[in-house]
Each structure stands twice: as structure tokens, then as C-alpha cells.
Amino acid sequence: MTCPRCHADFETRSSSCPECGVRLVRNVSGVMKTSAVMIAVAGEQGFYRSVQEVPEPLRSQLIETTSSANSGTIVIADRAGKDQITQVMGRREQGSTPEPRVRPGPNRLWLLVIGALLILAAASLIWFVFTKV
């Protein structure tokens, strides 16, 4: 392991750096959530740290446009964050009900049988023609 403070290399069994004595915390994970809102309207630009900072006339327009079908969310994550998102999405998909399988109706079943018989008849005719020559 390498100490984040003095960059000394040492065994990972110890809970502090043998060189500078800094206490080490392992397996730290967390979520850092930030937002940034940039609005450009009528030649003017504004940059805000949250939706709540956006002035009211623009905020209502922002909320209206971002709740449409054409809006989306961008998530930036490292490998561990990607794994966590994949697990959460997998649990959501497992909770949804599967679509029922469509069984072929009686008319479609007959079409399949007739098609198979026509292919068999054509193959027999071709075999018969080439074996008599």
C-alpha cells in the first residue's frame, strides 16, 4: 500500500503509515452528488449550482422542458459506481412483470404446417427429378 500523505510503500496489514503515522481508512466508498445548471436564453447565459438557484420565470420553464420525453439524466461514475448502478437496475427489472408469450393462433398454426409440407414436397420433387436423369 502507498501512504496518501508521504507516499511511502508498506504492508497493507497495518492501520497507520509506519513513516508519518497517518491513520488509514480502507474500503471507503460513497456517493458524491453534484449538479450544475446552465441556461442560455435570448443571448444571455446563466450558471447555477442547483435548480433552486434558478430565477422563478426560468425555473418553471426549466422544469417543464426537463420533464418531457426528450430529457435525460447524465450519470458519471467510476467502476464501483457502475457496478452499484447495474445492481440497482437489475433489481428493478426483476421486480417488473414479464411480458406474456404470444402463442400462434389456429390460423397461423395451419400456415406453418402448410409451409412445412410445401417445403417437403419441393424437396421430394427435386430429389425425384435428379435421381431419374
Image (cartoon, grey):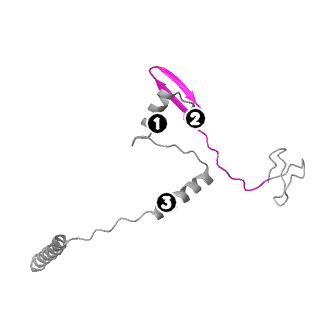
Q: Main secondary structure of the magenta part?
A: loop
Specify which label sits upstream in the sequence, 2 or 3. 2
Decide: is 127 above or below 96: below
Residue under pointer 1: 63
User: Quick one: SS at disc 3?
Assistant: helix
Residue under pointer 3: 92
User: Number of marks in the image?
Assistant: 3
At label 3, the amino acid type is Arg
Q: Pick out the residue farthest to the top.
A: 43
Q: Which mark is residue 50?
A: 2
Give the quarter of the image for residue 111.
bottom left
Taking the spot 89% from the left edge, 49% from the top edge, the residue there is: 21
Taking the spot 64% from the left edge, 45% from the top edge, the residue there is: 32
The local crowd at label 1, few if under 14, some if 14 to 19, many if 20 or more residues have their Cα within 10 Å, is few
Residue 55: x, y in percent?
53, 27
Residue 52: x, y in percent?
56, 34
At label 2, the amino acid type is Ser
- Front residue (pair 84, 9): 84
User: Quick one: SS at disc 2?
Assistant: loop
Using the numbered discs, state the Cα–Cα distance from disc 3 to disc 1 in whole angstroms. Answer: 26 Å
Span of residues in magenta: 25-49
Q: Which mark is residue 79?
A: none
Specify which label sits upstream in the sequence, 3 or 1. 1
